[in-house]
Amino acid sequence: MLCLGSQATSRALQRQVRQQLCYSLRAPVVLSACLLLAMTCCEYLSAAKPATEISPNCVPGVETTCTCEENKSGREAAASNSATLSQAQNALKLECKPNLQIAPEPLKDKVCSAGSDDLKKDCDVKLSSLLVGNPDVSWAEVSEQSRSQPVSKRLTIPPENFPLVDEQFAVGCTENTTKKCKVTVTVEARPSVTQGQTVTCAYGAGSNDLRQAVKLSPTQNSFTLVCGDKGEVLPKNYNEAFCSSGLTGNEETCKGSYTSILPGYEANWWNKDDTKHSVTLSIPTDQFPAEEAKIVVGCRQKEQQPSPVGKESPLHTLTPTVCIVDVTIEASSFASLSSRRADVFGLLAGAAVMTIFAQHA
């Protein structure tokens, strides 16, 4: 009987040990499950609640100032929530009022894509890639900042580095993931310009308010058209035919025959320079026409490639313009001289005839 009682007690102890072991193993599992559930809920709540948008207040000027502050939330400043930089207004100051930090961080030589809604993602756009000449341009700290003043940075773009096409990027201010103030910045393209016998084309919305014009003569018998790496020559068959009127940008080819105005024309009078993204027309001095002639050439912006998968597209499509060049080809000096001699001879002959009639009258 004693042995039977000992066996029962032993079995009871074994059950108790197993139960305690199960409870001890179950507790961490339950705790881990609770923690995982809590994290999932937090992530869901965080994703479900987007950051509060704060509209910036941008005041244009020689130095445009964009200020982000919490009491300017909502659509209150919607009319001035973006900035535009141009050769005449080439500086931008960004101010983040207390509790807001400048974004992206650190704001130096990289900015965000204009189409990105997140000031932490898609913020690897190098400023130099938006400009001409690959300049060393970056945001700088505004000097003499104190704790009572907003956090500020300034960007200055040298006029000579403004792009050939309108560009956009985004910067702004944030407070963790709860608040966001986004500033969309447009960098206006430079205007098309003629310097001597060289025309450099640009394609911004305001780049081609005026047509460019050059003259060719036996003493200045060539001109260069620079389309740049963002552009291409119009018409595409520029060395085979010419246009005789304005260009709309859709002219793949034109039908004007060079030999109709330049009898000795050869296609190799045009020279293409792929390094400088330009073409040059040189007319031999003895091949100028007997009468003045005009042709029209130009450049248009190349068709843009779609953004890679996962990359944000620009905020909105900026409308490019066509660079049009009116080229006047003067008559040869020999032809002009011959014409003047013929005119003089005609006058003298006429005078002689009149004299003879007068003598016989």
Image: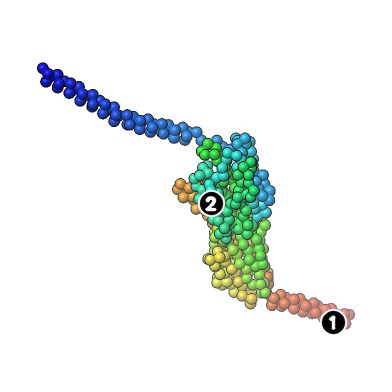
Mark 1 residue element = helix
Q: Residue at x 67, y 44 (%)?
A: 59
Q: Is residue 340 above or below residue 311?
A: below
Q: Nearer the viewer, residue 141 or 92?
A: 141
Q: How is the image coloured?
A: rainbow
* Secondary element at image label 2: strand
Q: Residue at x 79, y 79 (%)?
A: 349
Residue 311 in view (yes/no): yes
Q: Nearer the viewer, residue 263 or 228?
A: 228
Amino acid type at mark 1 = Ile
- Where residue 36 sits: x, y (%)? 38, 33
Q: Quadrant of the N terminus?
A: top left
Q: Nearer the viewer, residue 310 or 1?
A: 1
Q: Amino acid at mark 2?
A: Lys
The quadrant of the image that shows the C terminus is: bottom right
Q: Which residue is mark 1?
A: 356
Q: Mark 1: give few (<14), some (14-19) or many (20+) Cα within 10 Å.
A: few
State the image coordinates of residue 48 (x, y, percent, origin top left).
47, 33
Residue matched to label 2? 110
At a point 45% along the width and 48% down the height, the residue shown is 309
Query: In the picture, residue 330 is in which quadrant?
Result: bottom right
Which residue is rendered at x = 29% and y = 27% of the image?
23
Q: Position of residue 253 (x, y in %)?
A: 55, 61
Asked whether the viewer can see residue 75, the reply is: no
Which of the 4 quarters of the picture holds residue 210?
bottom right
Residue 257: give x, y in percent of width and height.
59, 67
Of labels 1 and 2, earlier in sequence is 2
State the image quarter where residue 213 is shown: bottom right
